[in-house]
Image (cartoon, helix red, strand yellow):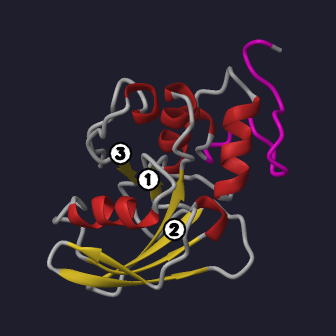
Amino acid sequence: MTTTHAAASPSETGTRVPLRLQLSGRPGVDRLDGAWWPQSRDIGVELADLVDHFPTEVGKVVRVVYSPPDWDLRPHHVAVEGRTLKVGSFPHDDTHQVTLRLADHAVLQLLVVPPNSSTEHGEKAMRAASTTGNRHTAADLLNLVSEDEHVDAGGHWRDDGGSWWTAAGTRASGPTD
């Protein structure tokens, strides 16, 4: 499931764009259940956007845990449409990840794409995090996307026996080798 993607990042245009969220078709199966690309480092504004526009067919977000280095502030509550959402942080980590607990007790692990990412890197990271078979941590995935310009995230994060990535996360082979 994908929400609308913008052609340019908000930092390039100075305006807000629709929610950038891409979810796996099989939540709970892979290491990541998708990706979220916030538009700023203001967690209050960005979580309100995520929760208020989260796909209703997936569920209602009732709790969020985040990685502190991704955000400028570290609140314990965030105002969302019609209610206050309890939020917390992973202590002392830099995972580039957010955990969403839904009303039905499902838990989604999402990559947080840095707001200042280029359109190319942001879209690749979102595609990789939502591709069935993804096995990389969020931080490793972001590093891999930014290090290798030739990676096709949708085709090389799957665990299909033909992946270009080794278990250690390094490039093993590819069409330009």
Q: Residues within 10 Å of mark 2 (few under 14, many from 20)?
A: many
Q: Which residue is mark 2?
A: 98
Q: Can you say whether 64 is above or below 11 in the image?
A: below
Disc 1 to disc 2, C-alpha distance:
9 Å
Callout 2, which amino acid?
Answer: Val
The image position of residue 103, as x and y in percent, is 26, 85
Dot 1: element: strand
Residue 123, disc: none
Q: Which residues are magenta?
A: 159-176
Quarter where residue 81 is shown: bottom left
The image position of residue 128, as x and y in percent, is 54, 43
The image position of residue 114, as x and y in percent, is 57, 47
Q: Can you say whether 50 is above or below 106 in the image?
A: above
**Labelled pair 3, 1 in contact (Cβ < 8 Å):** yes
Q: Which residue is mark 3?
A: 20
Residue plotted at (46% across, 49% down): 40
Residue plotted at (26% across, 38% down): 4
Residue plotted at (40% across, 35% down): 10
Callout 1, which amino acid?
Answer: Trp
Quarter where residue 55 is shown: bottom left
Q: Residues within 10 Å of mark 3 (few under 14, many from 20)?
A: many
Q: Residues within 10 Å of mark 1 (few under 14, many from 20)?
A: many
